[in-house]
Image (cartoon, rainbow, N blue to C red):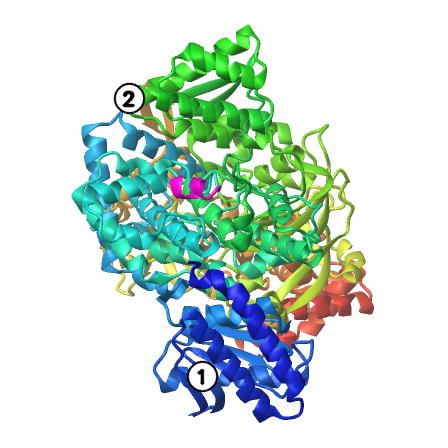
Amino acid sequence: MPSLRARIPEEGEALAEAFSSAAKRFAGREADFRASAEKALAEACERLGVELDERREVTLATGRADAVFNRLIVEWEPPGAMAASRDSHGNRHAVEQVQSYIDGLAAKERRQVTRLAGVACDGHSMIFARYRSGRWWVDDPVAVDAKSAGLLLDTLLSAQSGKALIAENLLGDFAGEGALAYKAVRSLLAQLDRERGQRPDDLPARLFDQWESAFAVATGVTGEAESPLKKDARKALADVLGTVPGETDAATGLFVIQTYFAIVTKLIAALSLSLFLERSSWHLDELKGLGDGELNARLAELHRGLPFREARLNNVIEPDVFCWFLERTSAEVTASVRAVVDRLATYDPATLQVSPEDARDLLKDLYQGLLPRPVRHALGQYFTPDWLAERVLGAVEHQGGPDERVLDPACGTGTFLVSAVRELRASLLAENASGSDSLACVLDNVVGFDIDPLAVVASRVNYVLALGQLLAEAPPEGCEIPVYLADSILSPTLLSMHTGDRLELSTSVGTFRLPLCVDTAEELRAVCDLATLALEEGWDSERFGAEAGRACRADDDERRLLEDFFDACWQLHSRSIDGIWTRIIRNAFMPAFIGEFDLIVGNPPWVNWEGLPEDYRERTKALWEEAGLYVHKGMAALLGAGKKDVSMLLSYVVSKRLLGEHGRLGFVMPETLFKTAGAGQGFRRFRFGDDGPSFRVTAVHDMVDLKPFTGATNRTAILVWERDAATRYPVGYTVWQRLEARGIDRHASPEEVEEQTRRLRLVAAPVRDDDSTSAWLTVPRRAIPGLRKLAETGEPAYRAYEGVNTGGANGVYWVERSDDVSKGKVPIENLHDVGRSSLPRKFGRVEADLLHPLLRGQDVQRWSAKPSCEILFVQDPATRRGIDTRRMQTEFPGALSYLAQFEDHLRSRAAIRRYFTRKEGIETRETGPYWSMFNVGDYTLAEHKVVWKDIASDFAAAVLPPTDPIPLPAHTVMLLPCSSSDEAHYVCGLLNSVPARALIAGYVATHISTHTTKVVVVPSFEASDSRHFAVSSASREAHRRVDAGESADQGAVDDAAAAVWGLDAGELATMRDFLRRWLKQDLS
């Protein structure tokens, strides 16, 4: 007998006919129509065996609902009252009624609002509404037909069944601080520790090594001491693992957490399978009563993907690195998995059909809930909100047509893929394509790669959920979900891993080689699948070579290479390290055979070069150079010249290798790539090497102010470029700004994001006319001519410097003093809790000559600089190292005694090792005292200085008044030495003017560093020039006013500065308007 859901299409057709008939018969008679429609609905439910709790005219605090059926609220409208547009007045009113009734019923009956649904119906049309993920989801009106009526019945059927398969419920049961999650993770950790300790060469240890190498590339985390996890993150991770910080390395802890997530994800996939496929023979509730041995056997089937292969889905689940625990499953792990199975068996997957939006955030919400926030923050694992993915797809002009191929080369949990699949499905439905043709088209056109095994698991499952009912159209030979565990940078062709007559792939268990006759995706699948079968059936290498050779037309030499390949696989098989490597090979080589794409989209990993594993840096170094991403000599490009991000290399490589002619790339990228010197310069060549394809940037969307990633401060932008065309400036540059202080909800729709923001339509061009790779100036098009007058093109007249840098020892050198001076010595106390790490509180009596007022960033405002503490200054500006030991002993013994309390900390500073030690043979020799400071020269002690803080939303400078002793800026304050007070005020006035601030706002990303005077033209001061004197006078007056608690006359400063630069009134007005809007002063 067909299942209840199998009968829904037939019942839906009958119900639709009854609704339509009632609407025609009782046009103008709402009460009669309602009675007839409700009777038809009740009869359909009775035939399906759905028990209805029917209530009519239900009085709620928010109004009176027409009818409540179980957890479904129905608002009947007069026949013909509803329009085709969701935004019509009548439809909006009906939807608002449904929403208020849902809220009212939830409050009255203490129900979860997410477990209720509503529908408005007039017999001709229906509108469904639900509250999920913190917002309302309202469908467009649909005609009353078999499909919409079937959805109504499906909603009612789901309302009487188990728990809704939605993110909120999964988080409560399987994540957070729940006992179930903690117990499972800790039992997995205990088993892994035993396995690696007792059998370091067996499968679990090897799979961990393979996972770690991939995870390190994606996040920068390894098992070594150097890790991006700081103290709070290590403690949070230890709390989950039930250990003390440092007892378990970060990589091991994260591996067992990901293993737990993979187990839950695969079980969710199995649970969902029965919803879409009647032919599925694998049901989760059948596992509940099994003994331990039988349960583990069924779990092994799941991890091998057997239920999905039986359902003709060949690779949804494959043996992967997370299968390690199945080798010798401990009783504790089995008990934990059983608890997961029992809990998940209470869920009803039909939610995914009734509310398809629930599937979009299902797995990424669960994973984010599993990882404590400090750990997520340290790893940079923030998943792309759906609205941002849809914005990227819109930016590359994704049409969702059947002739458009889309790739996400770093697909994560599949957010971009799911959006692309949904749009393509809608397009195919509109064209009345058959189910089988639609499935084939989607699988060929929407493809993903990721180097992270967990991401591939989650992405494939999300892809399956997005396919929905199309899964039933899988051909008899099965189909493959096109999401592959592959490195988009180091794929075979990308690295040209052809040595002679072979292809090579390096893994943690050795190098695998295949002959070049394996040159199509089908042949690769055939050889790897044949190797798996041969291992299972015990073939020898000659038989495998013969069979595989026939499959790919191998000659004798190539056949011998196939035999060697099989021998390598057999060696692993004989050591129980089998069942996975042939699939890893098949996945890893797929980028070489997948073809070209019209669109490449995604959010690539933002991992700094220095955070990559050393071997990966070595293997990719040639690619960085080939791509032209180094613009400085040698490896200095990766040190002093800025930090390079792997997203730069990925975007270049995939555009060259996988993007078709005139194809478009749309990536979520760090906004700093467009604004920073050094690291971004090579990227801004927008050409692969000297002879490779060019990339024409067509648009950039700056979303820094939106902060799209919850809990992160990433400076986010969307980059769009077209292959095979040169970038032409100016480039369109759109800045998105929030209209209110509150952030953008990650569950918001694209339309809601637009409503909550405004767009500044700017353009981008290199800030230096003579250097096309210089940082971008992003301003209104009409402002460019005027700002070009300010942009420095030659040698600047002034040079700025960083303030005194303690090398990470602020808590030693920054002090407070008392006025009790005795015999030239002053009692001091260190500011022990400043900086990243707190130091012990210490006291001392130091020589007064070594104490100077200290100006910190917080002490600088526009037109005002007032030091708030002091610094122990023990550096010799002439020798650029600490005052020598003998002089300290004789002249400054008090200071030396105080510093000795921190000797270990001061010697451990990385900057000391880098700048004041030298290798001599096997020994390391100190070249400066351990109390040495950094970035100190004669300029530091200049009497007249202009200063500004390095981080500010709006540039702010001041003249630092000279005192005795000379005040010293901290490293977060930039200083510019001048020869006189008049000159200092002249420079300060120009830099604080609106034209200079507008130019700085237009090209600076984060740090307003010493580069300011390399970009802004500050002509050398001439005391005899009346224009220069006017600027200096305006600055003096501004300082006087601010010191007196009054407002500075900014207009006088701007007019005087405009005369120096030759700006007319219109140009100055344009700059003022831009700066006002940039700072959102027009919104306050």
The picture places residue 765, in percent across and down from the top left corner, at 73, 50
The picture places residue 1039, in percent across and down from the top left corner, at 58, 70
Q: Name the residue at 66% across, 34% down.
A: 656
> Image height check: is 1070 above or below 809?
below
Q: Which label belongs to residue 702?
A: none
Name the residue type under label 2.
Answer: Arg
Residue position marked by numbered label 2 in the rendering = 575
Residue position marked by numbered label 1 in the rendering = 68
Q: Residue furthest top?
A: 556
The picture places residue 627, in percent across and down from the top left corner, at 63, 31
Name the residue type under label 1.
Answer: Val
Q: Which range of residues does the magenta coloring cover?
A: 306-312
Residue 168, picture quadrant: bottom left
> Image height check: is 326 above or below 541?
below
Considering the numbered disc 1 on the image, is that residue within a helix, a strand or a loop? strand
Whether residue 153 can be seen here: yes
Q: Is residue 318 left or right of residue 1071?
A: left
Q: Is residue 63 left or right of residue 225?
A: right
Kindly report which numbered mark, 1 or 2, lies closer to the viewer in this rendering.
Answer: 1
- What main secondary structure does the magenta stretch of the protein show? helix
The picture places residue 273, in percent across and down from the top left corner, at 43, 51
Q: Nearer the viewer, residue 208 or 539?
A: 539
> Image height check: is 498 above or below 378?
above
Q: Would you say residue 842 sits in the magenta stretch? A: no
